[in-house]
Image (cartoon, grey):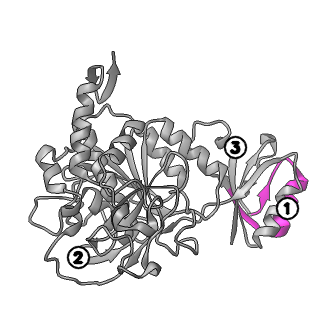
Amino acid sequence: NSRIWARISDTQSTPRVLDNGSIGSTNPSFANALNQIGVSEVHQALSNSKNEKLQTVYEFNCACEVSTLENTLRNFPGVIAEIERAPEYKTLYVPNDYNAVFSTNYALDLIKAPQAWNQTQSNAGIIVGISDENLNPYHEELAGKITYYDYHNTLPAEHGTAVAIIAAGKTDNQVGVSSIGFNSSIAFYEMDFNQLLLATYAGIDVINVSWFSGCSFSQFEQDVIDEVYANGTFIVAAAGNGTTCGDPSALAYPASYNHVFSVTSIGEHDNHEENIGDPHTTHQHNSRVDLAAPGYKVNISDSPVNYTVASGSSYAAPFVTGTVALMLSVNPCIDNDEIEQILKASSVNIDALNPAYAGSIGVGRLNANAAVSMAIATQGNMDVVAIVNNACTEG
């Protein structure tokens, strides 16, 4: 099926699905045209938005070629104002080395997680948002950690489970793996731009987006990101897995949008090439990448009692997301701009180790310990007179 997002300028003509499955509208010509090409579903794409423009964006699903759907909509300029591609919503999961035995955890060592935990282990009041396909809320590393989850979700749970555990799974519980976000809680949202809006208006301060929506810019999607960011939610996204848009230097979205913190992968030796010396084994590198974090052969668990090693920028991003949770636990009043500045200023420059990718793998590699230290220091510099019910009041 083909899918298109379009903004309806004449709300009186807004189409709807009738009880018999056909499309109806107060504009009969518009409804007939949609029925003739096989449009089967029309729904408000961004119902959680408080932006008047985005509230008029609808998704059209059709058993036809995307060009046919697009051309049909363009034939009604009095009804349709803007037309864009719909998001593809694909995860960035590339697993390997299943059933490996964990003898080390280079990722947490490299980003200095133990040193960060000496400063803070976060707390259950710090909630990490995870937007993904699904997760298993009964996993031994997640049970009791979830503050929000839609039990009607029937999508595969492996990818989201692994991402959530890296960000803020149970730690110091003698089971499985340690997680950078330690005692932070998790709110789980589906892999959907409308769900990002739901999360931000639920008060989520940081959300992880380890998925892909397309290889070209969408103004509708950028508008959603802008709304989420302006409402105070820091967005961390996986940059892409090298082949995501056919070329490792290509821009992949949503990671490449303004106000999204894009994270690519490095390995145990700060290597951007997973197999050092082989440029065909890199994840995404481009001008929109903000930071690098461990994403090659990292320890994960994607289902109960199954602990493996896997690669993917999907796994690099939650190391940053969990670090932001630690930062917020010591300084809940830092805003999005300050979070970005601290993550970048505290990072370790690895350009000399990756000269072919200098300028395209972000300003450096994540250093969680230094980021937490800077968040504490920033608190001392802020003119804050009170924190009431998790809300910061500046004097």
Q: Amino acid at mark 2?
A: Tyr
Q: Amino acid at mark 1?
A: Thr
Q: CA distance from mark 1 to mark 2?
A: 50 Å
- Disc 3 is placed on an element classified as helix
Q: Is residue 138 visible?
A: yes
25 on left or right of 315: right
The label shown at residue 307 is 2
- Disc 1 is placed on an element classified as helix
In this rendering, is residue 344 above or below 41?
above
Work out which residue is located at the far top of the displayed protein and give it: 395
Q: Residue at x 85, y 67 (%)?
A: 36
> From which residue to which does the magenta span run?
22-42
- Disc 2 is placed on an element classified as strand
41 on left or right of 158: right
Contact (Cβ within 8 Å) of mark 1 with mark 2 = no
Mark 1 vs mark 2, foreground winner is 2
